[in-house]
Image: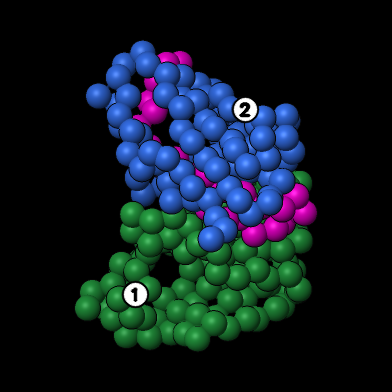
Chain colours: A green, B blue
Amino acid sequence: GQQVMQIPQYQHVQEGEDFTTYCNSSTTLSNIQWYKQRPGGHPVFLIQLVKSGEVKKQKRLTFQFGEAKKNSSLHITATQTTDVGTYFCAADLVAQKLVFGQGTRLTINP
Amino acid sequence: DGGITQSPKYLFRKEGQNVTLSCEQNLNHDAMYWYRQDPGQGLRLIYYSQIVNDFQKGDIAEGYSVSREKKESFPLTVTSAQKNPTAFYLCASSTRDRGETQYFGPGTRLLVL
């Protein structure tokens, strides 16, 4: 079935280093969403991107939607221990049903 | 407070036993979803419902059943036919509009004894 591929699966960084996770689809997406799941917690919505080439920022987090609306990225500048968790992208590839990427698990060495 | 509640937080199941996980929302959302998450894995859709008295199978519906008798409630039953039920189960809801944000409950961890 239609999938959203997310890489890398795991990323370990030193505190203060940057982090990026990528999300790719073979089909054009109407929009893409990003969620964060803290260890032991549940996914929490971060942001939605809709327009081609859109860039949105939330403090140290920068979200981008590709020009072809087939890929997206989440970049964290100068990671902090509070950034630990798994980051998921999600796209509505099928009507009213989000398809989640496999997630990127971020761990940070303080 | 508006939100989604799931109970119990932890659930233990004996072999051959059916168990039901509760999910309630007071967000006035039409759509509700059940996901399964295995350790270190992503979210896999079990069932979803866009309106009361209607629901559709997701990607891994075998061994599970649901009902949607009320807008606020979407219970999931893990039947004895589900041979590997140990997982973290997440319920979510959204408006019916395509691509809308999903709001997740705190989840239920199911363990088989």
For label 1, the crowd category at 10 Å Cα-Cα, with few meaning under 14, some 14 to 19 and many 20 or more, is few
Instruction: Name the residue located 72 percent from the left edge and 40 percent from the top edge.
Output: B50
Q: Residue at x 46, y 33 (%)?
A: B21
User: Residue A9 appears in which quarter of the rendering?
Assistant: bottom left
* Prevailing secondary structure class for the magenta stretch in the rendered image: loop
Q: Return the chain for callout 2.
A: B
Please tell me which residue is depicted at 66% across the width and 35% down the height of the picture.
B70
Is residue B10 located in the magenta-colored stretch of the structure?
Answer: no
Q: Neighbour class for label 2 at 10 Å: few (<14), some, many (≥20)?
A: some
- Kindly tell me whether residue B45 is visible in this rendering: no
Q: Quadrant of the C terminus of chain B?
A: top left
SS label for mark 1: helix
Residue at the extreme top: B16
Q: Is residue B62 above or below residue B106?
A: above
Identity, as a three-letter code, of the amino acid under mark 2: Ser
Q: What's under tag 1, amino acid-wise?
A: Thr
Which residue lies under the disc numbered 1? Answer: A82
Mark 2 highlights which residue? B67
| Percent position of residue B30, x then y | 71, 46
* Drawn side of residue A110 relative to residue A26, left or right: left
Q: In the image, which residues are magenta?
A: B80-104
| Residue at mark 1 to residue at mark 2: CA–CA distance | 38 Å
Q: Position of residue A109 (x, y in %)?
A: 23, 74
Q: Is residue B55 above or below residue A62?
A: above
Residue A90 occupies which quadrant of the picture?
Answer: bottom right
